[in-house]
Amino acid sequence: MIRAILSAALLLSALPAIARQSEAPPAQPAPPAQEVPPPPPAKQWKTERVKLQTAHGPIVIELEVERAPVTSANFLKYVDQKRFDGISFYRALTFPGRPDLGLIQAGQRDQKKLLPPIAHEPTTKTGLSHTDGTISMARLAPGTAAADFFIIIGNLSTLDANPAAKGDNAGFAAFGRVVDGMDVVKKILASPVSATEGVGVMKGQMIAKPVPVETARRAPK
């Protein structure tokens, strides 16, 4: 009997401790949230700006002098030596039912004002693409580009280099983009064209009254 009473007393004395053990431990404060570092800033490529003062208004182009150094340097030589003064936008390529897609082309047609052709810089090397506002060099075979250039309206990435394609797959050398004056570019694209002028694929794409480029000068950013 005594043993039973002692056992009961020990059990009763242990109940508070058991009850305390069964209680949930106090909540611990959450650790402070770790700040996620911001992503590194995008690389700022070196560029130069050029303003083409056309008869329809100014077009400001930003040249990728770091990503497309050969092509940009060539273009700037024509600008600095005033070899683009007096040239014209003479070609407007459009697609049926797509007024938002096409290109306009200009260049120095006077053989006496041409500089030597330059090495080709494909888009696979520069990382550029023929998207809306891109300026690129016209050419025949790779390495023949000199002073003719064109500006893209819309997305013509089919003009990019494509190593998987057969034949001449080097594409064209994009080297900058229009940063101001796309309204002027589109106005030139809408210029009436001659139905008879032009040779081969360019027939029907020659602007009836070419749009003069009065001056081409470097411009501040």
Image (cartoon, helix red, strand yellow):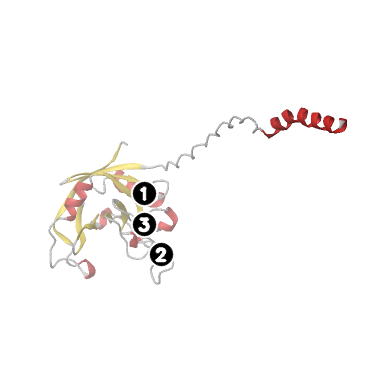
Q: Is residue 16 above or below residue 137?
A: above
Quarter holding residue 106? bottom left
Q: Dot 1: few (<14), some (14–19), or many (≥20) neighbours within 10 Å?
A: many
Q: Which residue is mark 2?
A: 162
**Residue 4 seen anywhere in this rendered image of the structure:** yes
Who comes first in sequence, dot 1 or dot 2? 1
Pair 3/1: label in front: 3
Foreground residue among 6 and 52? 6
- Which label is found at residue 72? 1
- Which label is found at residue 119? none
Q: Residue at x 19, y 55 (%)?
A: 189
**Residue 85 seen anywhere in this rendered image of the structure:** no
Q: Amino acid at mark 2?
A: Asn
Q: Amino acid at mark 1?
A: Ser
Who comes first in sequence, dot 3 or dot 2? 2
Q: Amino acid at mark 3?
A: Ala
Pair 3/2: label in front: 2
Q: Which residue is mark 3?
A: 173
Foreground residue among 178 and 75? 178
